[in-house]
Image: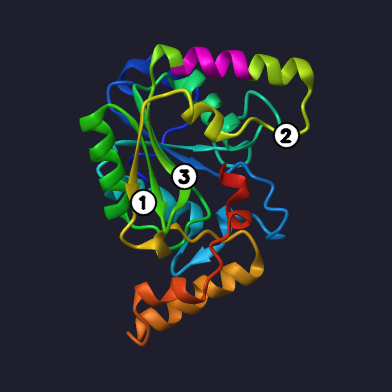
Amino acid sequence: MIFQSDIHLNDTVQSNAAQYNQDCLGVVLAGGLSSRMGLDKAQLPRNNATMLDFSKQLLISAGIKHVVTSGDKHGVNDLVSNAGPLGGIYSVIRQYKPKAIMVLPVDLPLMTSQAIIQLKQTGELSKKACYFQAQQQIHFLPLYLPITGFVELFLNKTFKNFSETKAAKGPAIRALLKQVPFQVLQSQQEQVLFNSNTPEQWQQAQTFFKQSKTNKKPLNKLSANSNFSSSNRSSHV
């Protein structure tokens, strides 16, 4: 599937970087190892599209003009290896220099463009980082993040230290969000934050896809039988 808004880092993009830093840049995080799933999560089929294509289309439908994919296999190469989601965000910021980013992980099969619009609009009006909370549980992704000089300085220092210490695990997104102004939005549909990291969780999502086609099971019933513990979202924090 070809996306009008899909762009890749090359000499043309670098020489015309100004056209990408005027608006919010959409970022699909697809650089994880998918070790618990056993398959590349970006290539899992969601109806007639892959999860990667589905995620890109969500951002485009939310009104974001330019979308990139973070991850060596699928788009923007990681500048720092094995640095987790924040490493992917850092790589995109360094290479594209956007004014703001709307970050969406590739493993949210029930996410909606309406939820992304809510984050983006609130973030643009408040000029703050924005993310969701559901049932007193914080979800750091998806994330709207204004890119300020402080954000760039924090990331540069953080990943310089990460590279020098050769830490086994990349810095957490929460470490950045503790340092910047933020606004937490209460999600009215907890199920949109359901992420699929294991075959069992993916099967739950597929069951919903099938039943929703026959209108036998409304969206707001899925979360009642789904595990939303923090362990399910460890790759997101």
Q: Is residue 63 left or right of residue 223?
A: left
The answer to which of 190 and 4 lies nearer the viewer is 190
Q: Residue furthest left?
A: 125
C-beta proximity under 8 Å, tags 3 and 1: no
**The C terminus, quarter of image:** top right
Q: Amino acid at mark 1?
A: Gln
Q: Secondary structure at mark 2?
A: loop
The answer to which of 107 and 53 lies nearer the viewer is 107
Task: Please name the residue that numbered disc 2 is placed on.
Answer: 169
- Kindly indicate the quadrant of the structure image that contains residue 68: top left
For marks 3 and 1, give the one nearer the viewer.
Answer: 3
Task: Estimate the spatial distance between the alpha carbons at disc 3 and disc 1, rounded to whole Å.
Answer: 17 Å
| Residue at point 34%, 63% (across, down) | 189
Q: Is residue 155 magenta?
A: yes
Mark 2, other Cα within 10 Å: few <14 / some 14–19 / many ≥20: few
Q: Amino acid at mark 3?
A: Leu
Residue 59 horizontal/vertical position (percent): 34, 46
The answer to which of 174 and 1 lies nearer the viewer is 174
Residue 187 horizontal/vertical position (percent): 34, 55
Q: Is residue 158 left or right of residue 168?
A: left
C-beta proximity under 8 Å, tags 3 and 2: no
Task: Please name the residue that numbered disc 3 is placed on.
Answer: 141
61 versus 97 height, above or below: below
Q: Is residue 90 magenta?
A: no
Q: Which residues are magenta?
A: 151-158
211 versus 173 height, above or below: below
Task: Estimate the spatial distance between the alpha carbons at disc 3 and disc 2, rounded to whole Å.
Answer: 18 Å
96 versus 8 height, above or below: above
| Residue at point 51%, 27% (across, down) | 176
Q: Is residue 120 visible?
A: yes
Q: Secondary structure at mark 1?
A: helix
